[in-house]
Amino acid sequence: MKKLFFTSLLIIPLTVLAQNEVAPEGDKLLWFVLILVAIPIVYYFVNKLVQKPGNKKSTPNSLSWRKLKIDLLKDRPYRPNVLTLKITNRSKKDIDVQAPVLCFRKIWSKRKFKLKGINRYEIYPLYLEAGKTHELRIDLSVFYSHDRNIKRFYWAKVRVLDTKGKKYSSSYITLRKSLFS
């Protein structure tokens, strides 16, 4: 038993020392960091080349390819009564716009409503010519009377589809204060 114990003590350190160690791969890490630094620098110079000389504003959208610009505006900062939807056609072609969808959002729940028209008249699909703007005023009291729980929702946004299936959306606006807004 004593011989087995001493033999095992001699064998264990030899097996541990027999492992191969791999040197750190510093070259790959260096290339990764250089690529991460080079991407914003290349983007900056490409943005400067694309920007027209007469255009003085600093535009993060100079490389933008969006045909429609969707804006959702409110009449007051918190608990607005009326939202205004502005759809601007920035392309050189005419676009057919499907009915917009108004999305109310809380933290984990959403409600969506399709906006079909004004005063019981259906105006969508809408033919929007190049360079023109369409404006739609949305009265929120209609939605609040339909479902009282919507008053407790924090954010709203509008999503629009064109007839070719391309999706456009506005940014979220704050309807009421919360811990997250």
Image (cartoon, rainbow, N blue to C red):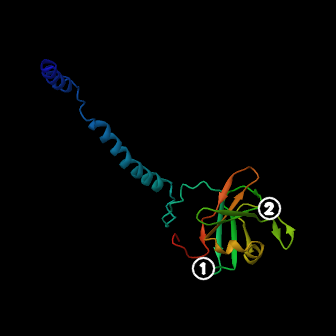
- Residue drawn at the location 64% of the way across and 71% of the way down: 153
Element on which disc 1 rests: loop
Element on which disc 2 rests: strand
Asked where in the image residue 131 lies, by quadrant, the reply is bottom right
Q: Position of residue 128 (x, y in %)?
A: 76, 61
Q: From the image, tell me which residue sits under label 2.
A: 126
Report if residue 46 is visible in the image.
Answer: yes
Amino acid residing under circle 1 = Tyr
Q: Earlier in the sequence, mark 2 or mark 1?
A: 1
Q: Residues within 10 Å of mark 2 (few under 14, many from 20)?
A: some
Quadrant placement of the N terminus: top left
Amino acid residing under circle 2 = Leu
Disc 2 and disc 1 in contact, CB within 8 angstroms: no
Q: Is residue 112 left or right of residue 79?
A: right
Q: From the image, tell me which residue sits under label 1.
A: 78
Asked where in the image residue 173 lies, by quadrant, the reply is bottom right
Q: Nearer the viewer, residue 32 or 135?
A: 32
Q: CA distance from mark 2 to mark 1?
A: 30 Å
Q: Nearer the viewer, residue 126 or 140?
A: 140
